[in-house]
Image (cartoon, rainbow, N blue to C red):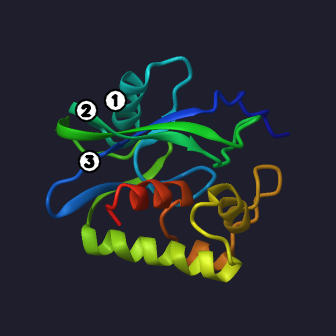
């Protein structure tokens, strides 16, 4: 028997750790399994506290000097009840401390070159073309690649070689990082 997902609060925050050559990425453990950045639901927290908590839980890092770089409502599904859209707050960390280690929803955490990040983005673009869905339609693209929580049906081509999670593709594209 599957436990019912917690109710979605439709708010999320995430964090970008980057230097001139690299960006911190995670390989998500849960739906939707993809390359992403540390992030999660606010669950009553303020966006900054949440971003710090999530980066600690998922990547082992404590960010400092957080700067809000993206804010907006995105139609992107999650595994929770009512989770069809999220209001996002994304911060850029000016500095950080701690030891890199994967935890909670991160199957893996790693520093990626900007070129490798572009490869993950190109992989997501392949699926946009395959399903003829533009990146702005994050929800449709996510459901096309991964199915939904009750009928998980991840595209076998994605499983073999995953790209950036559609919501992160949109955020990083809007920020001109990719």
Residue under pointer 3: 17
Local packing at callout 3 (Cα closer than 10 Å; few below 14, some 14-19, many 20+) is many
State how far apart marks 3 and 2 are (Cα).
Answer: 10 Å
Callout 1 touching callout 2 (CB < 8 Å) = yes
Residue closest to the eye, 52 or 128: 128
Q: Say which mark, if any, is on residue 66.
A: 2
**SS type, badge 2:** strand
- Return the residue nearer the eye: 64 or 110: 64
- Report whether residue 104 is seen: no
Total label count?
3
Considering the image in quadrants, where does the C terminus appear?
bottom left
Q: Secondary structure at mark 1?
A: helix
| Residue 151 percent location from the top left of the image | 82, 57
Distance of label 1 from label 2 (alpha carbons): 9 Å
Left/right placement of residue 68 relative to residue 104 reads: left
Mark 1 / mark 2, whichever is N-terminal:
1
Is 99 situated left or right of 41 in this image?
Answer: left
User: Is 74 positioned to the left or the right of 45 in the image?
Assistant: right
Examine the rendered structure and indicate whether residue 31 appears above or below residue 65.
below
Is residue 59 visible to the viewer in this orientation of the structure? yes
Q: Are marks 1 and 3 in contact (CB under 8 Å)?
A: no
């Amino acid at each position: 028997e599957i436990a019912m997902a917690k109710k979605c609060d439709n708010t999320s925050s995430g964090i970008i750790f980057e230097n001139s050559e690299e960006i911190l990425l995670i390989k998500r453990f849960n739906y939707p399994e993809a390359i992403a950045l540390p992030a999660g639901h606010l669950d009553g927290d303020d966006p900054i506290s949440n971003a710090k908590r999530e980066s600690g839980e998922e990547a082992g890092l404590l960010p400092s000097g957080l700067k809000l770089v993206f804010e907006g409502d995105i139609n992107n599904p999650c595994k929770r009840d009512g989770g069809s859209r999220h209001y996002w707050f994304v911060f850029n960390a000016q500095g950080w401390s701690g030891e890199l280690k994967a935890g909670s929803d991160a199957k893996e955490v790693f520093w990626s070159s900007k070129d490798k990040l572009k490869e993950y983005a190109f992989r997501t673009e392949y699926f946009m073309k395959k399903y003829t869905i533009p990146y702005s339609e994050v929800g449709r693209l996510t459901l096309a690649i991964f199915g939904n929580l009750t009928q998980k049906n991840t595209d076998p081509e994605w499983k073999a070689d995953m790209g950036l999670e559609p919501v992160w593709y949109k955020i990083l594209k809007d920020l001109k990082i990719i």
